[in-house]
Image (tube, rainbow, N blue to C red):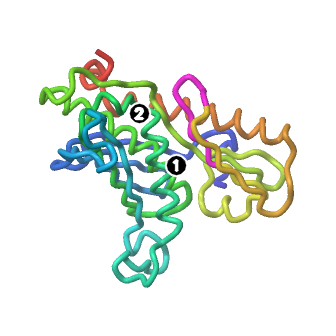
């Protein structure tokens, strides 16, 4: 950890809304040295199992570009087997983003969220959730303007952040150096009002107590609250008014 960062504060974060000129919604997220481009595409059909229901769906895909890491990472088409980690994170992002809106009101359409890691230094999945939520909301505002939906069926803003126990102390928003040394590592997805959507936790080296878990979750909720403020700032007053109308 840099000497200038308190363990209870986020790394330097920025969220740029509308980062892709062609997508219905997009966000470029920077968290320290991690950078993720999230795009939202509105597709005219829903999955087959929703045909005839009038309901829509939100799904996500996550991957790293070949030089997002120190060594070249093969593209999906170069792999003999599917990348299990990418599939797991894709499902996490999809679950998290479906908690933000009432998908029943989307009509028989799919909003596809694509999260492409440009540079990885820890926290790529949490950056994908946080940026994906911004891209999704921009796309839903686009759908409203086009008359595809009468309004944005927003449940709550959602963001995600990592926390961990490093050298015996709780730390917020782990970069790679901290993550690899963490005795406990958690990823927390939460709503704007502090309700939990998803908690992924692992004791890497030793078990941890319920009190330590509570401390880590409380630290994470402070982080997600700050990230929601950044999401709102990135969307801007005009877009927020459309979303919350």
- Secondary structure category for the residue under label 2: helix
User: Magenta residues?
Assistant: 187-195
Residue 188 visible to the viewer = yes
Question: Which element carries disc 1, helix, strand or loop?
Answer: helix
Q: Which mark is residue 138?
A: none
Which residue is disc 1 drawn over?
A: 126
Mark 2 lies on residue: 231
Compared with 164, 17 (above or below) is above
Q: Is residue 89 magenta?
A: no
Tell me what residue is drawn at x 24 percent, y 33 percent: 107
Residue 193 is one of the magenta-drawn residues = yes
Q: Position of residue 96 (x, y in %)?
A: 48, 41
Position in image of residue 128 (x %, y %): 44, 50
Decide if residue 4 is in sight here: no
Q: Earlier in the sequence, mark 1 or mark 2?
A: 1
Quarter of the image where the C terminus is located: top left
């Amino acid at each position: 950890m840099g000497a200038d960062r308190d363990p209870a504060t986020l790394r330097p974060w920025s969220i740029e809304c509308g980062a892709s000129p062609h997508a219905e919604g997009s966000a470029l997220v920077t968290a320290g040295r991690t950078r993720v481009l999230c795009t939202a595409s509105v597709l005219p059909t829903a999955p087959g199992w929703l045909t005839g229901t009038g309901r829509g769906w939100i799904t996500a895909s996550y991957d790293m570009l070949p030089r997002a890491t120190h060594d070249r990472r093969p593209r999906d088409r170069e792999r003999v087997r599917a990348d299990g980690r990418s599939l797991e994170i894709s499902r996490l992002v999809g679950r998290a983003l479906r908690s933000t809106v009432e998908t029943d009101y989307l009509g028989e359409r799919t909003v596809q969220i694509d999260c492409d890691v440009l540079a990885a230094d820890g926290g790529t999945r949490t950056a994908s959730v946080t940026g994906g939520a911004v891209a999704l909301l921009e796309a839903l505002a686009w759908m409203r303007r086009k008359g595809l939906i009468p309004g944005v069926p927003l449940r709550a803003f959602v963001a995600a952040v990592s926390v961990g126990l490093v050298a015996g102390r709780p730390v917020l928003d782990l970069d790679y150096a901290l993550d690899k040394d963490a005795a406990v590592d958690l990823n927390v997805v939460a709503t704007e009002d502090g309700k939990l959507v998803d908690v992924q936790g692992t004791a890497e080296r030793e078990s941890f107590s319920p009190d330590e878990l509570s401390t880590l979750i409380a630290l994470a909720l402070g982080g997600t609250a700050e990230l929601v403020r950044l999401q709102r700032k990135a969307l801007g007053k005009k877009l927020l008014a459309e979303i919350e109308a």
